[in-house]
């Protein structure tokens, strides 16, 4: 299975908790639409998903597990990762990174590319503990948030192309704001059964 995700807005190097959660919520809305439209992931919408428990950077789930998806309660939220370890899933990312700076200007205006991408990868995964949500409150009890990843180590390959964004700064935007188009390819890492239809 493959799909596209889009983000437009600030992407600071060494982004704050608020920066990352803001990006996470934009991606959440797109993943929610994916779950509504794509049969392979529609089960993630169910209200009776099993509960996972965080153990360090890993999620433990009850066995035997009859569903492909689960939720993890953290700080009043219910995070549902689409790509996760319990069913041996991973992904590759092709990122088109559009910025207003000319080549060579990215450090001056937006921060270095590596640390901006680190902010992005942190936002694509679910938080690993409550400290990563300090000061962030759910809009309702057990608010469901779809995340691309259980952990960003499940990204097995990344390619990034940068180009200039040839659009004027709109009201409410900053010169350093960027646009990302991300092509996600989901795959199975389980050696015996191919790609499970993904």
Image (cartoon, rainbow, N blue to C red):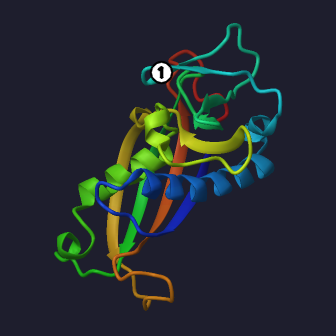
Q: Residue at x 70, y 42 (%)?
A: 144
Q: Residue at x 83, y 33 (%)?
A: 47
Across and down, in percent, residue 60 comes to 57, 15
User: Is residue 55 or residue 193 the one in the foreground?
Assistant: 55
Q: Is residue 123 above or below residue 62?
A: below
Across and down, in percent, residue 148 comes to 56, 43
Q: Residue at x 42, y 59 (%)?
A: 95
User: Is residue 122 or residue 131 the one in the foreground?
Assistant: 131
The quadrant where residue 14 appears: bottom left
147 on left or right of 119: right
SS for callout 1? strand
The quadrant where residue 86 appears: top right
Across and down, in percent, residue 134 comes to 47, 43
111 on left or right of 88: left
**Residue at far top of view:** 63
Q: Is residue 54 above or below residue 42?
A: above
Q: How many marks?
A: 1
Q: Is residue 9 above or below residue 121?
A: below
Please name the residue that numbered disc 1 is placed on.
58
Structural crowding at the residue carrying mark 1, measured as other residues with C-alpha within 10 Å and reported as few (<14), some (14–19) or many (≥20): some
Quadrant occupied by the N terminus = top right
Across and down, in percent, residue 143 comes to 71, 43
**Residue at far front of view:** 135
Q: Residue at x 62, y 28 (%)?
A: 72
User: Is residue 182 or residue 2 the one in the foreground?
Assistant: 182
Quadrant occupied by the C terminus = top right
**Residue at far right of view:** 47
The quadrant where residue 164 appears: bottom left
């Amino acid at each position: 299975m493959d799909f596209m995700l889009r983000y437009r807005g600030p992407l600071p190097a060494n982004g704050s908790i608020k920066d990352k959660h803001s990006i996470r919520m934009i991606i959440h809305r797109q993943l929610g639409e994916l779950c509504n439209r794509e049969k392979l992931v529609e089960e993630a919408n169910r209200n009776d998903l099993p509960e996972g428990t965080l153990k360090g950077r890993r999620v433990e789930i009850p066995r035997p597990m009859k569903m492909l998806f689960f939720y993890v309660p953290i700080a009043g939220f219910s995070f549902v990762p689409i790509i996760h370890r319990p069913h041996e899933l991973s992904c590759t990312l092709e990122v088109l990174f559009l910025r207003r700076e000319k080549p060579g200007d990215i450090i001056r205006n937006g921060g270095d590319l590596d640390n901006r991408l680190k902010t992005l990868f942190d936002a694509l995964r679910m938080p690993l503990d409550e400290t990563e949500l300090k000061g962030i409150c759910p809009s309702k009890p057990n608010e469901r948030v779809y995340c691309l990843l259980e952990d960003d180590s499940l990204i097995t390959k990344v390619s990034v192309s940068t180009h200039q964004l040839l659009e004027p700064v709109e009201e409410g935007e900053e010169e350093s704001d960027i646009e990302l188009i991300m092509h996600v390819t989901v795959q199975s890492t389980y050696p015996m059964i191919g790609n499970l239809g993904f």
